[in-house]
Image: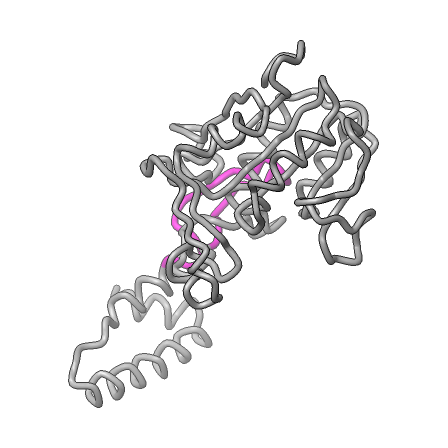
């Protein structure tokens, strides 16, 4: 049976929309005298609801994960709890750690906060402007006392800010035996981080960095940036069968950081 017939039978409403888009595509293609990639449109419709069974470590759902993003990433979002690849990777690492004491969570995501609160911690959330957090803080200059926190969690925040200010600030407010758990979008095939202060509009940032509020794309030198701020670093990398099982982005990293010279074990 043709794909179009299967879509028509399984989801007549979706197929009707597709048919309208197809007709519009043909019209637009003719107007501009160029072919419209209708096979691509059909492929997106076929695969958007998932192609493979994935397991979610947050909610234990097992089944097809939906596509997410533009361009779409297949098998990205759990249809039960809406976790993305980075959430699942971070939670898998958190489940291997024993966290205790005071914990500061920047730009908190609900699914991660729920897991952190299961640890023996005094949980505090923070964000620059959100109202549903405990503290409104500028991560570049928090105004908090020195060496206050046992654990700091900072996932997909540093690419939005001046990390030359934020990383030393995180080091300053972390206790001597404390741990910073960090994640960033990273392309380790690039030796250096790609950034340019002249790329300063939303349109240019989306073109160069993939999102209109990102200031850079981190390369393999991100670990050195952490070390330059005074941290010793270990990493946990999404790889192999675990990455496939849980729908992780292969090569994605969780950075486990402690103050250089501390007696605490890294990781």
Where residue 192 appears, as percent x and y from the top left, is: 37, 38
Secondary structure, magenta segment, majority class: loop
**Quadrant of image for the C terminus:** top right
Residue 204 against residue 170 in the figure, above or below? below
The answer to which of 18 and 12 lies nearer the viewer is 18
Query: Which of the pair 63/174 is nearer the observer?
Result: 174
Quarter of the picture containing the N terminus is: bottom left
> Relative to 97, is 14 above or below?
below
The magenta-colored residue range is 47-66
Which residue is located at x 56 percent, y 20 percent?
Answer: 232
Which of the 4 quarters of the picture holds residue 91?
Answer: top right
Residue 63 part of the magenta segment: yes
Quadrant in which residue 262 is drawn: top right
Percent position of residue 53, x then y? 45, 42
Q: How is the image coloured?
A: one colour
| Horizontal relation, residue 22 to residue 200: left or right | left
The spot of residue 203 in percent (x, y) is 44, 68
State the image coordinates of residue 141 (x, y, percent, origin top left).
71, 44
Whether 236 is among the magenta residues is: no
Q: How many marks?
A: 0
Judge from the rendering whether residue 250 lies leftward or rightward of residue 174; answer left or right. Answer: left
Say which residue appears at 39% left-offset and 50% top-offset.
Answer: 51
Q: Is residue 36 above or below residue 65?
A: below
Q: Is residue 55 or residue 96 the one in the foreground?
A: 96
Q: Residue at x 39, y 46 (%)?
A: 194
Q: Residue at x 47, y 29 (%)?
A: 223
**Residue 156 falls left or right of residue 201:** right
């Amino acid at each position: 049976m043709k794909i179009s017939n299967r879509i028509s039978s399984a989801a007549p409403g979706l197929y009707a929309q597709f048919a309208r888009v197809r007709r519009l595509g043909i019209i637009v293609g003719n107007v501009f005298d160029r072919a419209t990639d209708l096979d691509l449109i059909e492929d997106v419709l076929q695969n958007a609801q998932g192609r493979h069974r994935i397991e979610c470590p947050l909610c234990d759902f097992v089944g097809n994960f939906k596509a997410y993003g533009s361009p779409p990433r297949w098998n990205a979002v759990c249809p039960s709890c809406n976790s993305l690849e980075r959430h699942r990777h971070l939670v898998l690492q958190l489940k291997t750690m024993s966290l205790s004491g005071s914990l500061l969570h920047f730009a908190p995501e609900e699914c991660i906060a729920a897991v952190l609160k299961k640890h023996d911690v005094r949980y505090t959330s923070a964000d620059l402007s959100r109202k549903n957090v405990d503290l409104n803080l500028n991560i570049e200059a928090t105004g908090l006392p020195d060496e206050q926190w046992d654990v700091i969690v900072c996932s997909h925040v540093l690419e939005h800010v001046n990390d030359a200010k934020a990383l030393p600030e995180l080091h300053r407010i972390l206790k001597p035996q404390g741990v910073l758990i960090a994640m960033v979008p990273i392309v380790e095939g690039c030796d250096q981080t790609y950034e340019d202060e002249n790329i300063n509009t939303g349109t240019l940032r989306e073109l160069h960095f993939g999102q209109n509020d990102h200031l850079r794309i981190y390369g393999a030198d991100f670990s050195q940036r952490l070390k330059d701020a005074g941290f010793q670093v270990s990493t946990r990398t999404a790889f192999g069968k675990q990455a496939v099982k849980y729908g992780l982005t292969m090569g994605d990293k969780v950075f486990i950081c402690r103050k250089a010279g501390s007696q605490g074990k890294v990781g």
